[in-house]
Image (tube, grey):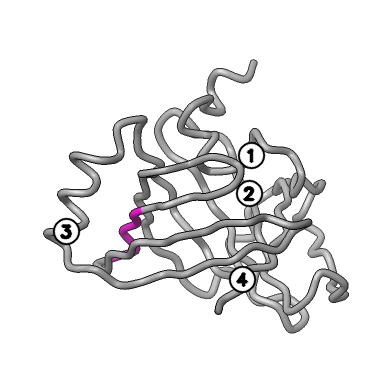
Amino acid sequence: MAIEIERKFIVKKIPNDEIKYSHYIKQGYIISDMQKVIRVRQKKDDFFITIKGNKTGISRFEFEYKIPKKDADQLFKNFCKEGIIEKTRHYIEHKGHTWELDVFHGQNEGLVVAEIELESEEEKFSLPEWVDYEVTYKEKYYNMNLIKNPFKRWT
């Protein structure tokens, strides 16, 4: 059983000189509420279905499975009716941890969020200087909510 433990932060500036690699991500939600999420995602040329649920603190169950492109295309077209999130994900190593910086496109353009996955909720880590403030517990920053209430509507 997979457990995801993740914290999320707003980014002050993108540290372009520290980026190890990047790729495009497209994702849509089949089911999205506070108890469970079923998501379809394209990451580069690979496609996945992900099931997440039972959030406790910053931990939740997560199961992700690779699926064929034709299946993903049908899921995007027929099941992700609320919309699609598109972003570029940059990977940065910082003091023993990999940070994922999501630069959003479309209706969420202008939003840049950094996430770090941890081994435990108590795990210590160092904040890079390009991180501004934490938004882990702010639901409006969840990807599933950015479809319903995009960043461009916040002002």
Nearer the camera: disc 1 or disc 2: 1
Helix, strand or loop at disc 3?
helix
Query: Whole-percent x and y of residue 143?
Result: 53, 43
Name which residue type carries label 3. Asp
Query: Whole-percent x and y of residue 35?
Result: 59, 47
Q: Quadrant of residue 61?
A: bottom right
Q: Which residues are magenta?
A: 40-44
Residue bearing the label numbered 2: 113
In this view, the residue in front, 52 or 72, is: 52
Residue bearing the label numbered 1: 141
Distance between the alpha carbons at the discs numbered 4 and 3: 31 Å
Query: Whole-percent x and y of residue 75?
Result: 22, 49
Q: Quadrant of residue 34?
A: top right
Name which residue type carries label 1. Tyr
| Left or right placement of residue 49 versus residue 142 in this view | left
Nearer the camera: disc 4 or disc 3: 3
Mark 2 / mark 3, whichever is N-terminal: 3
Q: Quadrant of residue 24?
A: bottom left
Q: Residues within 10 Å of mark 4 (few under 14, many from 20)?
A: some
Is residue 138 found inside the magenta-colored segment of the image? no
Residue bearing the label numbered 4: 92
Distance between the alpha carbons at the discs numbered 2 and 4: 13 Å
| Left or right placement of residue 109 versus residue 77 in this view | right
Query: Whole-percent x and y of residue 43?
Result: 34, 63
Residue occupying image coordinates x 59% and y 63%: 100
| Left or right placement of residue 73 versus residue 119 in this view | left
| Left or right placement of residue 75 versus residue 49 in this view | left
Q: Residue furthest left?
A: 70
In this view, the residue in front, 87 or 42, is: 42
Quarter of the picture holding the C terminus: top right
Residue bearing the label numbered 3: 71
